Amino acid sequence: MRRGVWIEQAIWEHLSARDQHVVAVHADLLVLRSGWYADQRSAGAVLDLPLIGAMPLKPQLITAHTLHSVSPFRRSASLPPRHVTTRDGIPVTTMARTVVGFAQEQPFLDAVLVADAFLGLGLPRQALLDLLHDLSGSSAALEVIGFADGLSESALESLSRVRVHRHQLPPPELQVEVYRGNRLVARLDKLWREQRLAGEDDGMAKFGSTAAQVQTSLKQTYRRGLDIEDCGLALTRWDWNDAFQNGGAVVADRVRAGFLRGERTKLAPDVRFVPTTVEDRLRRESRLAG
């Protein structure tokens, strides 16, 4: 990997591109003098934040030391002790510092993904705002932090939400529970209540990894869709390719078409909507983990 830093080839070849990058980051930091930390997208990889696109060609590192030259991969900046930490033995900027760095320097979409993930852990938005103030952050970074929502539970949910925003469509409510009387019908990824439209982000992970799991999941998804429509909601769905390609035009078109269908529906009289919070999800996941 580096002079004096080795990894077994069999292990290396079985790593994902992202994990290979993390190993390269660790290798660089093992041979550099102390005071260097993983930064930007390299920090995002180390901290297991959602990232879109290829990893950097080289590890992106930051130090408080004065440098004679800087590059897209090595830079110098103020690094108070509270802005850095260690993850799995790798020196790295804290999650808050990493998110704010994305908000200031990365495209809006990339920055929203990591900011959503930060808030989704139950961490406070104010921590990002305070750090942004300390760094004299930009208005673009403030827009990212204001737009971020921890109720986006996956990279796809964040991606499609950004696409809806960029196409100037009404913002959806996230993770709203739909009940018929006392029976929970579904927890919707996205709900446009006024337009009577439910939107679902169909990432492949939700369908399982085996043929039997996929078959079962498809049946459950079909029945769930019927139950949602029986409530008097129009339903539209999309996958990663729909949201990623062509600026999310497919998502925008399906939402607009869904609005038209929703105009022709009528909610069942016993339907009620219950918003949820990040704290609700974390408690639910804790029960499931137990």
Image (tube, rainbow, N blue to C red):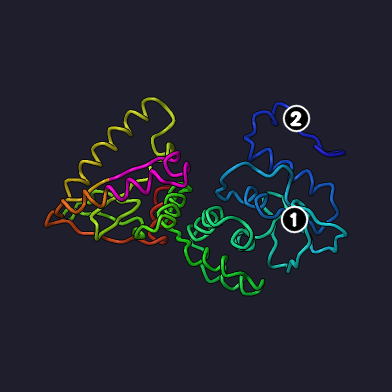
Left or right, residue 212 beside residue 123: left
Residue 279 in sight from this viewpoint: yes
Within 10 Å of the Cα at label 2, are there few (<14), some (14-19), or many (20+) other Cα atoms?
few
- Say if 17 sits above or below 186 in the image: above
Q: Quadrant of the N terminus?
A: top right
Within 10 Å of the Cα at label 1, are there few (<14), some (14-19), or many (20+) other Cα atoms?
many
- Say if 232 sits above or below 132 in the image: above
Mark 1 residue type? Tyr
Report helix, strand or loop for mark 2.
loop
Q: Locate residue 22, reporting x and y percent.
A: 69, 43
Q: CA distance from mark 2 to mark 1?
A: 24 Å
* Range of residues picked out in magenta: 236-257
Left or right, residue 208 beside residue 116: left
Residue at (23, 38) in percent of width and height: 223
Report helix, strand or loop for mark 1.
strand
For disc 2, the marked residue is 8
Residue at (33, 28) in percent of width and height: 215
Mark 2 residue type? Glu
Which of pointers 2 and 1 lies earlier in the amino acid sequence? Answer: 2
For disc 1, the marked residue is 37
Quarter of the image holding residue 128?
A: bottom right
The mark lying in front, picked from 2 and 1, is: 1
